[in-house]
Image: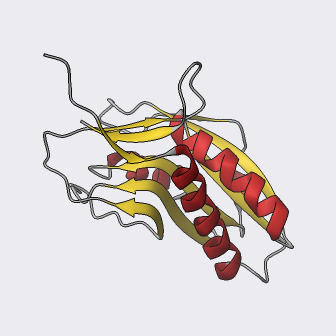
Amino acid sequence: MPDKKILILTSQQIQQKIDRIAYQILEDNFDEQEVLIAGILPRGNHVAERLKVMLDKIAPFETRLLTIELEKESSKLQAKTNFDVQECSNKVIVLVDDVLNSGKTLAYGFGIFLDVPLKKLRTVVLVDRNHKNFPVTTDYAGIALSTVIKQHIDVVLNEAGQEDAVYLR
């Protein structure tokens, strides 16, 4: 029996959520010179790319896209980045992922910046599932869903032959 998928967000709704989050980031950082947007690979980076495009249109500050690749199944922080973490010193970081489930991925994302004095660290997720095992909260969420733990959220972004969407299954 195939999994039944329920459409949660269409492509247009995803973009509307990202646009709204971009305006919230602008409001929170209006006086900044630069904001660094750190996307967690793979889908968090797609959300981060779209946020950067929107912020580049509306914000007076510069934005720079950073990518973070985490070993999510590891019991300790193992990460690869496309930047030197020390470059983030005294800057605003916006950490982006697609779905917040247990909070482990965002907690590992925080870990990358622990030894660097930041001006501000904010978090963005497209979908917040409210099933946190870690004391992690988001500053900006596209949508918050109260789901059953056995349910799964599928975020489809930039995938060949498929329209962007968020599904619950």
Query: Residue at 47% of width from left, 39% of height from top?
Result: 165
Q: In the rendered view of the protein, which quadrant contains the C terminus?
A: top left
Q: Quadrant of residue 22?
A: bottom right
Q: Is residue 92 above or below residue 41?
A: below
Q: How many marks?
A: 0
Query: In the image, residue 108 lies at what x, y percent?
Result: 42, 47
Left or right: residue 2 versus residue 59 is left
Query: In the image, residue 149 lies at what x, y percent?
Result: 14, 46
Query: In the image, residue 3 lies at what x, y percent?
Result: 20, 25
Left or right: residue 136 versus residue 98 is left
Q: Is residue 97 above or below residue 76?
A: below
Query: In the image, residue 69 lies at what x, y percent?
Result: 54, 33
Q: Quadrant of residue 160?
A: top right
Q: Closest to the observer: 13 or 77?
A: 13
Residue at the top extreme, as displayed = 1
Q: Closest to the observer: 127 or 108?
A: 127
Left or right: residue 68 versus residue 49 is left
Residue 65 seen anywhere in this rendered image of the structure: yes
Query: Residue at 64% of width from left, 63% of height from top?
Result: 19
Left or right: residue 37 versus residue 167 is right
Q: In the rendered view of the protein, which quadrant contains the N terminus?
A: top left
Image color mode: secondary structure
Q: Closest to the observer: 119 or 102?
A: 102
Residue 85 seen anywhere in this rendered image of the structure: no
